Image (spheres, grey):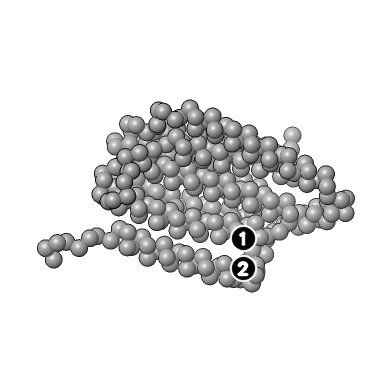
Amino acid sequence: MNPELIVFIIFGTVSIIGAIAVISFRHPIYSALSLIVTFFSQAGLFVLLGAHFVAAVQVIVYAGAIMVLFLFVIMLLNLGTLSAKGALTGKLKGVAIILGILLAVEGVYIAVRALKNDTAVASDAAKEAAAALANKPIETYDIGRLLFSDYLLPFEVTSLILLAALIGVIVLVKRDKQPEN
Amino acid sequence: MSLPLEYYLVLSALLFTIGVIGVLIRRNAIIIFMCIELMLNAANLAFVAISRHLGQAEGQLFVIFVMAVAAAEVAIGLAIIVSVFKHRETINVDEINSLKG
């Protein structure tokens, strides 16, 4: 059996199980920890795809920074006892799950079918060119070069987005002025 | 020989669907946020897989952008949740049904 397939199956199964655990645990802390498991296994999949830089950023930014923020807020608000009851909606849960399964079938169908058409139409020469391109690994160097040349404007706009988020958070959670002051 | 692209796209579709179901069935605002992160991650997986399939680095570049925007979104969203909790003492989205704080 192909070793790459075995690694894919392990990481894929762990990430699916982690994702299901996120939506089925009642306590938000357990959901957050399951989400970290999913993020780590997705980082493993990124390594499998040869995207080492993205895998490192996934672990550092997602599993590190973003999840610490989540856990901090859950513990700050002390939500454990509060949200244990009525965590799921009774009325529309069945409808939601049926619609979700429909969406899954649709997504899988599109993923499989679209590629079939794509490979049927492409000529042999185009296929060979694509294969030659795909064999060349994408280095962190390539990402950096693109980021600071062709995509410099989006990069700067991203920094503006982060600045706007920073200011927005400060304004949102700013303590209101006390009336007596 | 590397794995076909379909495997990754199917896994990405399944993860995205689990995120959508989570947003639909959970009423805890923080868990809804986590499900949104799950969907963003599914999209990232598809980006990286297609980037490898086409041999172009742009896909991985967009993943970096998605992560930056997700970080900003989480910061804002959690700040909104904290300030809603301060006013209403709940983060159940069914009970937060009026715009007036």
Q: Residue A151 carries which label?
A: 2
Provide the secondary structure element on which disc 2 rests.
loop
**Image-quadrant location for residue A153:** bottom right
Disc 2 marks a residue whose amino acid type is Tyr
**Left or right side of A176 for B78:** right
Residue A10 in sight here: no
Work out how far the residue at label 2 is from the one at label 1, CA to CA, in angstroms: 9 Å
Element class at badge 1: helix
Q: Where is residue A48 in the image (x, y as percent from the top left)?
A: 66, 47
Chain ID of residue with mark 1: B
Query: Which is nearer the eye, A119 or A33?
Result: A119
In depth, the one of A89 and B31 nearer the eye is A89
Question: How far across and down, in percent of the image, does residue A107 sit?
Answer: 63, 39
On the image, the x and y values in percent for residue B66 come to 54, 56
Numbered circle sitting on residue B61: 1
- Give residue A53's quadrant in the image: bottom right
Q: Is residue A11 above or below residue A90?
A: below
Residue A168 on image: x %, y %: 37, 62
Residues beneath discs 2 and 1 located on the same chain: no
> Residue A8 has which mark?
none
Q: Which amino acid does label 1 sit on?
A: Leu
Using residue A60 as the reference point, say whether residue B78 is left or right of it.
Answer: left
Question: What residue is rendered at 64% in x and 63% in y?
Answer: A143
Give the number of callouts: 2
Q: How crowded is mark 2: few (under 14 residues within 10 Å), some or many (20 or more)?
A: some
Quarter location, residue A80: top left
- Cβ atoms at labels 2 and 1 below 8 Å apart: yes
Considering depth in this image, is A179 or A78 the residue closer to the camera? Answer: A179
Q: In which quarter of the image is the N terminus of chain B?
A: top right
Is residue A177 among what the camera can see?
yes
Q: Residue at x 48, y 46 (%)?
A: B36
